[in-house]
Image (cartoon, helix red, strand yellow):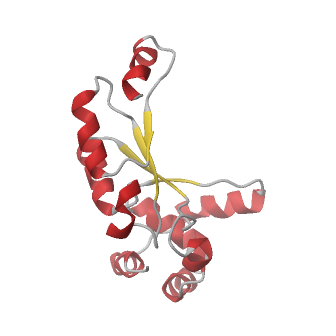
Amino acid sequence: ASRALEPLVKSGKARAIGISNFNSSAVEALLPRVKVKPAVNQCGYSIGGHSEATQLWGRDDATRQTCRKHAVHYSAYSPLGGVTMHGTGHVLSDPTVKAVAKAHNRSAAQVALRWVLQRDVVAVTSSDKLSHISSDLAALEFALTDEEMEQLGKVR
């Protein structure tokens, strides 16, 4: 399917080609077969959803690293944990996430988004509520320490 889209990029009818849920081995297998490298690989990725247990769909750190190695942007849908085994509620109510949020006077959602962003992952969120959109953008206004990043990375 990716090769079928290549003429659209070459003719200017499309700016880029993206892939979704490609794991590390799928990305490695695709690249030698295409003339136009995908610009982005969009996968579910969050504090609670980035382990080897989620690698089938590219939701793991190995896939993120493979994309980086090949200059393919890695983008996270459900960065608040919606695709993890326990869902968004698990991430946002996790004691570690809540403790880090309290230390920064931020919401658990802001901490979850900040963790994704500090791993050089593009986070895709959606809302029809201005208050949620503003809150999501506030994740750009602070930074997590290396220790906090490590602690949050261990949340499952």
Residue placed at 39% from the left, 35% from the top? 39
Image quarter where the N terminus lies is top left
* Residue nearest the viewer, comparing 156 with 116: 156
Return the x and y of residue 28 as percentages of the image width and height: 24, 43
Position of residue 79 in the picture relative to residue 50 (left or right)? right
Q: Work out whether residue 23 or residue 124 is closer to the camera in this orientation and state it.
A: 23
Indicate the position of residue 86 as horizontal and vertical percent values.
55, 76
Q: Is residue 44 above or below residue 153?
A: above
Location of residue 81 by image quarter: bottom right
Point out the image quarter for the C terminus: bottom left
Residue 40 position (above or below residue 11): below
Q: Residue at x 60, y 83 (%)?
A: 93
Q: Is residue 10 left or right of residue 109?
A: left
**Residue 84 drawn above or below residue 37:** below
Q: Is residue 120 visible?
A: no
Residue 110 visible to an observer of this rendering: yes
Q: Nearer the viewer, residue 118 or 76?
A: 76
Could you tell me how many numbered marks the image carries? 0
Left of 27 or right of it: where is 11? right
74 or 4, which lies in front? 4
Residue in view at x 48 percent, y 86 percent: 96
The quarter of the picture where residue 152 lies is bottom left
Residue at point 60%, 71% (across, down): 88
Rendered location of residue 138, percent (x, y): 61, 63
**Image spot of residue 41 (x, y percent):** 41, 44
